[in-house]
Image (spheres, grey):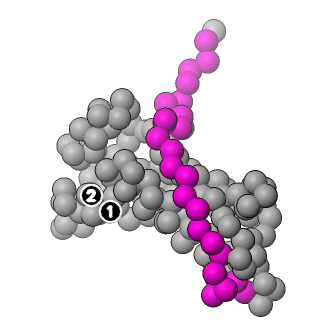
Amino acid sequence: MKSKVNRDTQPSHLTVTHETRVRFNETDALGIVWHGNYLKYFEDGREAFGRKHGLSYLDIEQNGFYTPIVKSMIEHLAPLKFGDIATIKTTLINTRAAKLIFRYEINDQHDTLVCKGETTQVFIDTKKDLAIIAPAFFKTWKAQHNLD
């Protein structure tokens, strides 16, 4: 019996890598990046993804939608410190649902995986109503990127 592939958890071919230098104000009293700042790094990755692939927050808003985060998961594996260069790899997870799922991996300048995580965003229209079906512009965008 063949196992069924769960298409909603398969990474797409759409990945962006973005670098940032850890700033002093991102660290805590221990001299390491405060845990909450990793969500900001994830946002940096999403913004870089959107700019590269035509799916920025402004692109989405121009089509009459917003994409609030409804779920986030972070696994901290090693610390980043002031001055470190963090590389944020952001990958869109292809899903048939009306949502955006991004997976992240953050490495330091020594290529050590320091953090990984995932966020889920839903589409809401300008009246703040949840889109149950993927918006037409997003379906078109997915078709242009060979995603089903």
Question: 142 left or right of 85?
Answer: left
Q: Residue placed farthest to the top in the image?
A: 1
- Which residue corresponds to mark 2? 60
Q: Residue placed farthest to the bottom in the image?
A: 29
Label 1 sits on what residue type?
A: Tyr
Residue 54, x across and y down, in percent: 31, 50
Per the model, the C-alpha gap separating discs 1 and 2 is 5 Å
Question: 46 left or right of 17?
Answer: left
Start and end of the magenta stretch? 2-28
Residue 3, x across and y down, in percent: 61, 18
Residue 29, x across and y down, in percent: 77, 90
45 vs 13: above or below: below
* Front residue (pair 136, 91): 91
Label 2 sits on what residue type?
A: Ile
* Front residue (pair 66, 54): 54
* Front residue (pair 56, 36): 56
Q: Label 1, secondary structure: give it.
A: helix
111 vs 24: above or below: above
Q: Label 2, secondary structure: give it.
A: helix
Mark 2 surroundings: few (<14), some (14-19) or many (≥20) residues within 10 A:
some
- Which residue corresponds to mark 1? 57
Residue 63, x across and y down, in percent: 19, 56
Q: In which quadrant of the rendered image does the C terminus lie? A: top left
Asked if residue 4 is among those painted magenta in the image, a careful observer would answer yes
- In the image, what residue occupies the spot 21% across and 45% down? 137
Q: Name the quadrant containing residue 116.
A: bottom right
- In the image, what residue occupies the spot 24% across and 67% down? 128
- In the image, what residue occupies the spot 61% across and 12% down? 2
73 vs 2: above or below: below
